Amino acid sequence: MMDTIFFTYIPSPVGNFLLAGRDGALTCTSFTTGHRDRQPQSDWREDAGPFSEIIPQFTAYFEGEATQFDIPLRSQGTDFQKKVWQALTAIPYGRTWSYGDLARKVGNPNASRAVGAANGANPLPVIVPCHRVIGASGKLTGFGGGLDTKATLLRLEGLTIDDRDRQLELI
């Protein structure tokens, strides 16, 4: 059972949110909306028990009461992806960076598209806050859970979104 991946769904402001992990570490999160929703694999086991200490942190975040997480993570990706994902965790709650900002943070200012691809491959949305990355113009761009979900998360963090053109209102 040591390699068993456990999963459960918890409520979020935009529907169910998948938590999956093994050996006490979270390996995957996913919204059930958007084009990158992850589905449990046939060998995963549904059981909320392994997430008993994790669920309250997500619940508090989704209720606007928590701004950070203390959860063991285990993600698989290339060295470059992991570098981008680590940089994402430096984006403060309620703030956004552009893809260019993220590329500069990982030491490759000309790699906006590559960091965009790594951002899109993030297996742990919300806890690794890929929703905080926007276009240089302030437009909401690309999010595996869908742009409505991205806007909801940014609003939850206190940002104002102009829904006519999905533009972050820069104040």
Image (cartoon, helix red, strand yellow):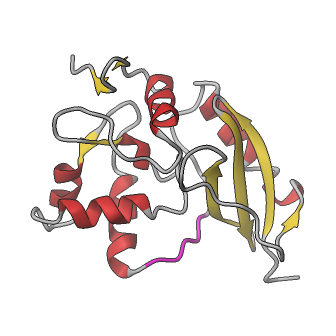
Q: Residue at x 41, y 59 (%)?
A: 120
Q: In front here: 55 or 153?
A: 153
- Residue 74 part of the magenta segment: yes
Query: Which quarter of the figure is the C terminus placed in?
Result: top left
Q: Position of residue 165 (x, y in %)?
A: 30, 23
* Left or right: residue 23 compared with residue 120: right
Hey, which quadrant is residue 139 in on the image? top left
Question: Where does residue 144 sit, x and y in percent of width and height?
Answer: 49, 51
Q: Nearer the viewer, residue 33 or 103?
A: 33
User: Does 118 appear in magenta?
Assistant: no
Query: Quarter of the image holding residue 167?
Result: top left
Residue 101's place in the image compared with 13, above or below, is below
- Could you say where residue 163 lies in the image, as x and y percent from the top left? 38, 19
- Residue at image coords 63%, 32%: 14
Near-viewer residue (46 or 34): 34
Q: Nearer the viewer, residue 127 or 98?
A: 98
Task: Point out residue 31 in the picture as x, y percentages from the top left corner.
Answer: 62, 46
Q: Main secondary structure of the magenta part?
A: loop
Q: Is residue 40 left or right of residue 99?
A: right
Tally the numbered discs.
0
Tell me where residue 33 sits by quadrant: top right
Q: State which quarter of the image contains the N terminus.
A: bottom right
Which residue appears at 36% of the width and 80% of the height?
A: 79
Instruction: Write the residue at 22% across / 62% down.
Output: 113
Q: Which residues are magenta?
A: 73-77
Asked if 125 appears above or below 108 in the picture, the reply is: above
